[in-house]
């Protein structure tokens, strides 16, 4: 198993892509703590995961990911509960599709807070714990294909994912001497609640643009994140793995 004995935190691990990552991590032998926006949703996810994987070591937690202090405290407590921390996946994220002239400052700040500030917080809290433990680790963030092309409306979301890619490239260099590998996965369209607000007609148009002729399943993103965290890929860092069914070729 790829992640046997590893201890992992997955933010936004209660549904969608994050939940699928949690499933794949458990299947590969990791102990997992899923972070949700509310303790109630984290508890429900733990119940589901425990029912699906009775032998799994799973915890659920919630904290304000946009607060560095709260994230540092929650990650430190989680590492104590799990007996260490080897892997963090910064996956929680939101999108906002307003056109520029309707976009409010509050909406823009909300996207930046979760998609960028929380990702910074996750990197710092994880790096602190991993560096003190002295054994390195992996930090992986869910970026998006929009960080390659932008998108025609909702400028905050692509802006946040370009920032994520920049953070990953920079921190991979800063944290490499500590044995911490920093990467991102950049999915195209993935069948989750995030796509629910896209009108059917527009979805069909998007579908036609994907050479594979379908959207990704969340499990396929889970597989990609597992691969990026595979300890045998010990020289791989600073990469954003594009996973878009051939869209960007
Ligand atoms: P989703 O809406 O199904 O899940 C989002 C997750 O983030 C949930 O677990 C939710 O609890 C968490 N979250 C939302 N707001 C939060 C907050 N304020 N505090 C803490 N947690 C919060 O979406 P998803 O599609 O699973 O998205 C996961 C990641 O994948 C996001 O970073 C998203 O940008 C990225 N992504 C999604 C797609 C797609 O097509 N679905 C494509 C590319 C990238």
Image (tube, rainbow, N blue to C red):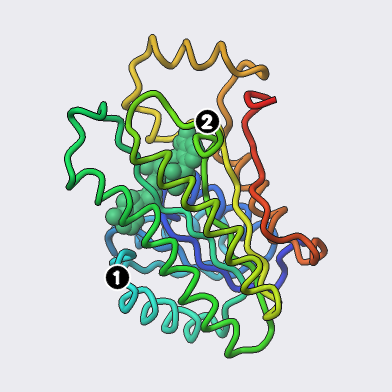
Instruction: Say whether marks 2 and 1 touch (CB < 8 Å).
Output: no
Tell me residue 37's x, y (percent).
30, 58
- Quickly name the residue at label 1: 67
Ligand 1 within 8 Å of the CB at mark 1: no
Residue in the image at 40% along x and 63% along y: 35
Q: Is residue 187 visible?
A: yes
Q: Nearer the viewer, residue 6 or 248?
A: 248
Q: Is residue 16 visible?
A: no
Residue in the image at 67% along x and 47% along y: 224
Q: Is residue 168 above or below residue 215?
A: below
> Hey, which quadrant is residue 25 in on the image?
bottom right
Q: Is residue 170 above or below residue 111?
A: below
Quadrant location of the N terminus in the rendered image: bottom right
Q: Nearer the viewer, residue 146 or 65?
A: 146
Quadrant location of the C terminus in the rendered image: top right
241 relative position to 235: left or right: left
Q: Earlier in the sequence, mark 2 or mark 1?
A: 1
Tell me residue 41's x, y (percent).
31, 56
Residue in the image at 36% along x and 69% along y: 61
Circle 1: element type: loop
7 relative position to 13: left or right: right
Task: Please rate how many residues cluster around mark 1, counting C-alpha atoms within 10 Å: few if below 14, some from 14 to 19, many from 20.
Answer: some
Q: Is residue 182 above or below residue 107?
A: below
- Quickly name the residue at label 2: 149
- Gap between marks 2 and 1 measured at Cα: 30 Å
> Hey, which quadrant is residue 202 in on the image?
top left
Q: Is residue 37 above or below residue 150?
A: below
Residue in the image at 35% along x and 59% along y: 36
Task: Please rate how many residues cluster around mark 2, counting C-alpha atoms within 10 Å: few if below 14, some from 14 to 19, many from 20.
Answer: few
């Amino acid at each position: 198993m790829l992640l046997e004995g590893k201890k992992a935190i997955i933010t936004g691990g209660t549904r969608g892509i994050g939940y699928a990552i949690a499933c794949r991590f458990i299947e590969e032998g990791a102990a997992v703590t899923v972070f949700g926006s509310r303790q109630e949703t984290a508890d429900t996810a733990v119940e589901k995961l425990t029912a699906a994987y009775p032998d799994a070591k799973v915890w659920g937690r919630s904290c304000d990911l946009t607060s560095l202090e709260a994230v540092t405290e929650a990650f430190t407590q989680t590492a104590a509960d799990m007996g260490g921390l080897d892997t963090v996946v910064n996956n929680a994220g939101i999108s906002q599709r307003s056109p520029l002239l309707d976009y409010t400052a509050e909406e823009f700040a909300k996207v930046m807070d979760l998609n960028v500030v929380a990702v910074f917080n996750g990197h710092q809290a994880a790096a602190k714990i991993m560096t003190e433990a002295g054994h390195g680790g992996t930090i992986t963030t869910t970026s998006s294909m929009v960080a390659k092309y932008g998108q025609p409306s909702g400028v905050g979301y692509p802006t946040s994912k370009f920032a994520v890619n920049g953070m990953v490239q920079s921190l991979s260099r800063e944290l490499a001497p500590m044995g911490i590998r920093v990467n991102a996965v950049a999915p195209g369209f993935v069948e989750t609640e995030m796509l629910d607000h896209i009108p059917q007609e527009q979805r069909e148009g998007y579908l036609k643009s994907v050479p594979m002729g379908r959207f990704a399943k969340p499990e396929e993103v889970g597989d990609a994140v597992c691969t990026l965290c595979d300890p045998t890929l010990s020289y791989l860092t600073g990469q954003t793995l594009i996973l878009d069914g051939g869209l960007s070729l």
